Amino acid sequence: MSGAPAVAALDWGTTRLRAWLLDGAGKVLAERRGDDGLITAREKGFATVLEGHLAAMGAPEALPVIICGMAGSRQGWIEAPYVTVPSPIGAILAGAARIEGQRRDIRIVPGLAQRLADAPDVMRGEETQLAGAGLPAKGRHLVCMPGTHSKWVAVEDGAVAGFGTWPTGELFSVLASHSILKHSLGEHPAAVGADNPFFHQWCERALGEGGDVTSKLFAIRAAGLLQDLKSDEAAACLSGLLIGGEIASAKRRYGASEAPVVLIASGALVALYGAALGLAGLAFRVVDADEAVRAGLVEAARENGMIGGAA
Amino acid sequence: MSGAPAVAALDWGTTRLRAWLLDGAGKVLAERRGDDGLITAREKGFATVLEGHLAAMGAPEALPVIICGMAGSRQGWIEAPYVTVPSPIGAILAGAARIEGQRRDIRIVPGLAQRLADAPDVMRGEETQLAGAGLPAKGRHLVCMPGTHSKWVAVEDGAVAGFGTWPTGELFSVLASHSILKHSLGEHPAAVGADNPFFHQWCERALGEGGDVTSKLFAIRAAGLLQDLKSDEAAACLSGLLIGGEIASAKRRYGASEAPVVLIASGALVALYGAALGLAGLAFRVVDADEAVRAGLVEAARENGMIGGAA
């Protein structure tokens, strides 16, 4: 570790945790990844899990800690109440909930709630990525944050106007493991490459159907019976169908924006969503999800007076 | 048992089996239901399972047996090769596959295959319901057969023009058991009534989205967090969303027909699909699925010369 850490930052989800020691400019001085997400931490104790990771990174005793993600849910360490949208992005971070009775200053960023009668929605963790993505202060921007529960956010002049959730990653794994498609995909579906022609073909089919995915699921099974589709090809079909369906649906809901879609992602999802956005005729630019969440956490620490002003 | 049976008829699916002794007019003389579908029969032997049910119903030794369903698939007793659509409905039944080496005349009705490059599909069992539904010989008719894998069939002048599969029943059970919605629906989701206001509301929402279901799944979870949705209400939401989505999608694919939709169903699905079709503005008439499959099996026995001409 070189340099003095200004804050410890955690993205603390349901099943996983990532922790960093950061300097005041957001530079990474140390990093830890663990499987001790919310579910494990509820058993072991949140403070115990946190201090274990901090000690392993050599964090000073008084270092403040800023956290985002499901650790702030009702089932988490403490509930950091949702901020209701529409809301300026800056105002979200300023309301971090403080955990009392700790020797450190530990705070959790609130999630967002969309309290619409016909489109209720929530997020926890993605609001911090959003805040750290460096979005322009003016204009309308559509943001895509793909994952287990993909989030699409409409941002207008620096405020969250509305958002939606597409459980694309979860649908893939649930259908691959528990539906009739398990016979098509096999026990260990291969990772899908963004250049796979089956991914492209089924993505385009889904894009032509405005988000209607369920009418095409069984066709993957039937293609195995009638067209000799192989298991790795079937996985590519399902991935293309679900990602294409998500993009078609989000495009229908939010309309095309003049500015390119901001794709906040990392790893294999960058290429898959990039290819699918291209097939949908949507321009996009990529923001690295890991960098975004760290930048958002530093910003939250600053907004809450845990570290000094702009570096 | 009163009267002499003309044929034993079986609807032999993946997990269940139903068997009847029928007279030449299709009247039920005896009935059996069992859990020994394809999966069990592959272990015990198809002939053993069949003869057990026939003996329990007191079937004569030489009584012919006509079968439809997954027992005729590649994983079944013998494969009854698919008939490719478009095909006249009568021509489907005439091609039953005979099982050799049995003391009885035992035949299995073939399934249907739609060999379209961009919409491959298959059915086994529903073709027999379709044949037994008493559809008019002329005109265009849209048929809905709801279930684990709902089938919609476009029939033109007595021929199957095309069909599609919506895995609505399977999606409900997979999502209720294995997705984040299990927290919303609870361990034992209550049966959903067709008069449930949540069923209606979410059905209408789905109908307004042209078959886009995935954009609304997470909203059921969010409604539990933000709107205090109860578990039996969540089950009604999911049921309404999936059934409404199926109908919206099928309506978009096949267009509205002048004739009422023929709903071939039995049990609770009659009321649920009836309510949903009504919300979609589609006129419909109900054909009992059990009666239809029996009538189709008798017709198949006749077409294959296993019993005498029209009663």
Image (cartoon, coloured by chain):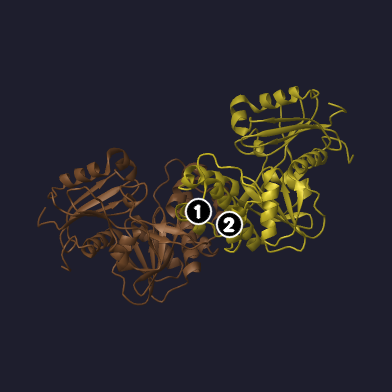
Chain colours: A brown, B yellow
Inspect the image, locate mark 2, and give the three-letter code of the amino acid beneath it. Answer: Trp
Can you name the residue that lies furthest to the front here?
A: A101
In the picture, measured across the screen, residue A213 lies left or right of residue B257, that is left
Locate the C terminus of chain A by quadrant: bottom left
- The circle drawn on residue B202 is 2
Instruction: Look at mark 1 in the image and give the residue it sits on.
Output: B220
Rendered position, B186 above or below A270 = above
The image position of residue A153, as x and y in percent, is: 40, 65
The image position of residue A7, as x and y in percent, is: 18, 56
- The circle drawn on residue A98 is none
Q: Residue at x 60, y 29 (%)?
A: B40
Number of numbered discs on residues: 2
Q: Residue at x 64, y 57 (%)?
A: B247
**Marks 1/2 same chain:** yes
Kindly indicate whether the residue at mark 2 contacts the one at mark 1 (C-beta within 8 angstroms).
yes
Q: Dot 1: within a 10 Å radius of its alpha carbon, few (fewer than 14), some, or many (20 or more) residues?
A: many
Query: Residue B210, can we see it?
Result: yes
The answer to which of A244 and B120 lies nearer the viewer is: A244
The answer to which of A160 and A141 lies nearer the viewer is: A160
- Mark 1 falls on what kind of element? helix
The image position of residue A197, as x and y in percent, is: 45, 58
Q: Residue at x 61, y 25 (%)?
A: B44
In the picture, measured across the screen, residue A154 lies left or right of residue B50, that is left
